[in-house]
Image (cartoon, rainbow, N blue to C red):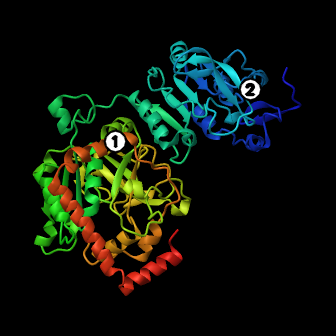
Amino acid sequence: MLDYDSVIETQGVQIPFVPRIITPKIERPMRNNRYEGGEVASLRRLLKPGDRVLELGAGVGLCSTIAAQNPDVDRVVAIEANPDMIPLIQETYRLNDVCEQAELRNGVATVRSGAEIPFYIRQDFWGSSMEAESRPFARVEQVPALAIDDLLAEVRPTVLVCDIEGGELGLFDDADLSSVRNAILELHPKVYGRAGSARIVAALARKGLYLSPENKPDSSVQIFERRPPPQPIRTRSALKTGSDRWYGDEPRTLITTCMKDEGPFILEWVAWHKALGITDLVVFTNDCSDGTDLILNRLQQIGVLTHLPNPAVVAGQTVFQPIALAYTQLMPIFSDVDFVISMDVDEFVNIRAGDGRLTDLFDAAGPFDALSIFELNHGCNGQVKFEPGLMRDQFPGHSTETPGKWRAHRGAKTITRISSKLVKLRNHRPDMDAGANPVWLDGSAQPFDEFQSDSSLNGADARGRYNLVVLDHYALRSMESYFMKMLRGDVVVAGKRVSLRYWRLRNKSEARTSTPNPALVAAANAFHETHFAGDPELMALHDQSCRWHSEQIERISEQQEIKDRRDWIMENAWT
């Protein structure tokens, strides 16, 4: 018999007040009707007559009680691993007169059934879980293992509620979720990282369950909804192969970009994005001094990319990037590819789904016309000297993925499907035909309409928009490379100089959550070895460019402007 003296009523449900379980940390939100507020509100809104609800991680029994209180719901089955919670949940059911409507089982939902598995009990019940590493635990209990396939086959849930402290990772990869119309999941990136969250989103997307437009981007609780199987977007590759995948079996994706004096950084960037699945690269240059144009010429000779002089120079114009983008849309290659993105050589697309390839992103996100990827600025990471080497190794620290409201505005670059909906290609985002109702998503595959509604925007509030893909932006590199960038000038508009404010805003190194996808690292290294390392002419051009940068840095180091900037940085904005 559960021993308690009083009852807490929260959101219309009576919960027995047992102080050793309902500690002050959750007592207050319970009494204020805020405990599990998002899950409760979503569940009440989503329930329909005839629904069957399966809850994984019953907690105090709040959500399963609410589902059972609905007279139109056919069945409610709740699974709770913590044996200490079973008496409290049963008493919650009794207090709310739903003992007949709600079925409670003690066990852990697992990929495969088994006799028993260890479950780690912590002082705060909501922290108990199947993993032992994240924080201390009080004791270990052996708990029945309940195969997720067996539960799904028996209950055939139309609504799935899941809060199992990280146990959701991998649980649904091969599960039959065909009966599920809606899923309410609490994600736990602190347990398995952003890559784990992306894996879960991708697994559900493969089963036709997509993130709901009503989700709050920065919330750990995410609603998934079943959408009708989309008609495949008949891309050029889909038409050629007859594929039923919305993007075709072998989609062609083009990066178009402008470069000037970026020689030491080109090979890493090209290898990364080729491994990512970029099939075509068009690079425009003007007035290069460090051999960038020679490196690009060699890469064109070996069939890796297309290198062109910037047409703005021929036209006597100085708006280099806008003219290059307009010219890209007139090139024959533009008629042959399926997707396009305009981005810079200091930006790396980092996909957190699957093996980190574009097709993994396309699978996880579902059909779109535009998908905007938000940047994380990587600071100089305390590095003064220019050293040849990989950006991802030298500058791992970056701005946080969870900024406060006033620091949440970030820039973006956009992958755009080439169709009649595309009006104009631009650097950060395209112009799309609003009347054609383009599907525009963010980096968490959630609907994103800010760019569509305001054509002047190049960025937006990035909170919650990094689940599937981020744009790792190495805008500064080392302090010496920043000086070179400052003197080189802007590749977008002639005469524009990189300012001190540019350094202050981008020298962020406090977080290290955007780690390169290991599968992509291996693939990029392999591409470099196969296509670059064995080409003596290319590698000699790369080495010459690195030496040129070192020599120029030595030459300018005693200039007063450089000394003044160095002193200001060290005094005001080094860390």
Please state, as top left, top right, bottom left or bottom right, where the N terminus lies in the image: top right
Determine the image quadrant of residue 95: top right
Q: From the image, tell me which residue sits under label 2.
A: 85
| In-front residue for pair 179/502 | 502
Residue 376 % position (x, y): 43, 56
Q: Is residue 305 above or below residue 542?
A: above
| Residue type beneath disc 1 | Ala
Q: Is residue 295 above or below residue 316?
A: above
| In-front residue for pair 10/309 | 309
Determine the image quadrant of residue 9: top right
With 552 as the anchor, is 560 left or right in this view? right
For mark 1, does the 10 Å Cα neighbourhood hold few (<14), some (14 to 19), or many (20 or more) residues? few
Q: Is residue 321 above or below residue 55?
A: below
Residue 551 % position (x, y): 28, 74
Q: From the image, tell me which residue sits under label 1.
A: 522
| Residue type beneath disc 2 | Met
Residue 486 % position (x, y): 34, 75
Residue 80 % position (x, y): 66, 24
Q: Secondary structure at mark 1?
A: helix
| In-front residue for pair 418/120 | 120
Q: Residue at x 28, y 75 (%)?
A: 552
With 100 as the anchor, is 268 left or right in this view? left
